[in-house]
């Protein structure tokens, strides 16, 4: 699907509405290419209008043209003027959907004042269309994966060389920008040792990475607004028997999750493929999160892969597979790849080696 075809894909999903007010900025960006911080799209059956403020009028017109999106840009100066412009587009329509998951109570009251009583709450309509990634989108995500792979390859040999978690994080983020990313995809996680690595989403500190530590590095890059997401885990020095055993277990679980990934598989099945191995080995309560999540213009988006998920995987989903084990006193291990679901399974987009917890060329001192 090209960017210009996305509006039609959303219209096709209209059910009981004849217009949609898109207020979520990620959805606005996906529909129009517009990346500013304030704007609404009014989508009717034959027209697309982007309403924004004076800071973004020129940018919005340029970005729509660049994306090949046919639509008008209307510019207002105040919040209520913007809503009046939305109302001008909306008035002929009896039933206008609004994105109730993304609207505050206050905004809803303002919508009612300006747009009247025909508002219909709608959930996940653009998100459902956004979920299936086009080859163009996959290419951006793959470029982001490649940048994170290169950055990680540069820092891994320095693990155990006396650097802190924060220093490794800083190096990764600088390298990703140098390699062409517009930034990190999220706050890079570097978690080392028996306490910090036991927290799945630890924030890097000045704590030094030391011999004997397990180290979790969760790193992604941002390219064209698209995210990548990958985790690798390491042991500094020779792994102990429990460290090696748990690494092998998590890796086996992650490979089982990848093998289960195909169109038509339920998210529960993929989660179970990972989780059952870890549960059977006696470490079920060390695996304290879901198996994966969709990735795109957001770092966490549909579909979510967990025990509670009702999702079924589809062709074109871009999702992570990321089992992990965590326990204070031991530390933690997580292995995460990003994949695109293909006709016969999935294609793994992240390429960093994961066959061993030993960093290549470990320092000998
Ligand atoms: Zn991650
Ligand atoms: Zn993730």
Image (tube, rainbow, N blue to C red):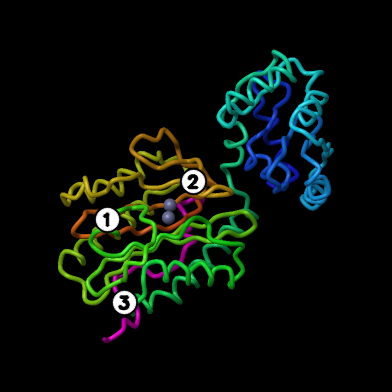
> Quadrant of residue 17 in the image?
top right
Give the percent coordinates (x, y) of residue 337.
42, 58
Mark 1 nearby-residue class (10 Å; few <14, some 14–19, many ≥20): many
> Quadrant of residue 211 in the image?
bottom left
Give the percent coordinates (x, y) of residue 141.
57, 58
**What kind of element bears circle 2?**
loop
Question: To which residue does mark 1 refer?
Answer: 198
Label annotation for residue 160: 3
Closest to the observer: 49 or 259?
49
Give the percent coordinates (x, y) of residue 149.
48, 69
Q: Is residue 359 magenta?
A: yes
Q: Are marks 1 and 2 in contact (CB under 8 Å)?
A: no
| Residue 231 appears in the picture as rendered | no
Who's the residue at 38% across and 63% down the image?
190
Q: Which residues are magenta?
A: 341-365
Does 56 sit left or right of 283 as displayed?
right
Who's the residue at 44% across and 46% down the image?
293
Q: Does the numbered disc 3 mark a residue whose Cβ is under 8 Å from ligand 1?
A: no
**What kind of element bears circle 1?**
loop
Question: To which residue does mark 2 refer?
Answer: 300
Main secondary structure of the magenta stretch: loop
Is 160 located above or below residue 129 in the figure?
Answer: below
**What kind of element bears circle 3?**
loop
| Residue 84 appears in the picture as rendered | yes
The picture quadrant for ligand 1 comes to: bottom left
Mark earlier in primary sequence (3, 2): 3
Closest to the observer: 331 or 10?
331
**Distance between the Cα atoms at labels 1 and 2?**
22 Å
**Distance between the Cα atoms at labels 3 and 2?**
31 Å
Who's the residue at 60% across and 41% down the image?
130
């Amino acid at each position: 699907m090209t960017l210009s075809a996305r509006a039609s894909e959303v219209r096709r999903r209209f059910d009981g509405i004849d217009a949609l007010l898109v207020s979520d900025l990620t959805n606005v960006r996906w529909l129009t290419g517009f990346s500013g911080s304030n704007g609404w799209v009014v989508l009717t059956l034959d027209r697309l209008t982007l309403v924004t403020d004076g800071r973004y009028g020129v940018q919005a017109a340029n970005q729509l043209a660049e994306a090949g999106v046919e639509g008008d840009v209307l510019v207002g100066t105040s919040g209520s003027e913007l809503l009046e412009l939305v109302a001008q587009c909306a008035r002929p329509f009896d039933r206008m959907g609004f994105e109730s998951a993304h609207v505050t109570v206050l905004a809803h009251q303002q919508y009612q004042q300006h747009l009247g009583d025909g508002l219909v709450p709608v959930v996940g309509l653009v998100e459902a269309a956004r979920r299936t990634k086009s080859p163009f989108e996959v290419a951006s995500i793959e470029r982001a994966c490649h940048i994170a792979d290169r950055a990680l390859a540069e820092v891994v040999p320095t693990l155990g060389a006396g650097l802190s978690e924060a220093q490794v994080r800083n190096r990764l983020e600088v390298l990703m920008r140098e390699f062409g990313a517009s930034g990190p995809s999220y706050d890079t996680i570097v978690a080392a040792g028996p306490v910090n690595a036991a927290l799945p989403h630890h924030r890097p500190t000045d704590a030094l990475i030391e011999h004997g530590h397990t180290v979790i590095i969760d790193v992604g890059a941002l390219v064209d607004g698209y995210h990548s997401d990958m985790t690798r885990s390491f042991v500094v020095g020779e792994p102990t028997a429990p460290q090696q055993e748990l690494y092998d277990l998590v890796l086996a679980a992650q490979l089982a999750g990848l093998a289960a990934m195909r169109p038509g598989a339920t998210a529960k099945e993929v989660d179970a493929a990972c989780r059952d191995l870890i549960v059977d080995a006696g470490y079920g309560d060390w695996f304290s999160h879901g198996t994966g999540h969709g990735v795109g213009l957001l770092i966490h988006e549909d579909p979510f892969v967990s025990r509670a998920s009702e999702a079924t995987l589809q062709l074109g989903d871009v999702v992570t597979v990321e089992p992990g084990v965590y326990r204070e006193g031991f530390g933690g291990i997580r292995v995460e790849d990003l994949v695109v679901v293909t006709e016969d399974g999935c294609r793994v987009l992240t390429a960093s080696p994961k066959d061993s917890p030993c960093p290549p060329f470990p320092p000998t001192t």
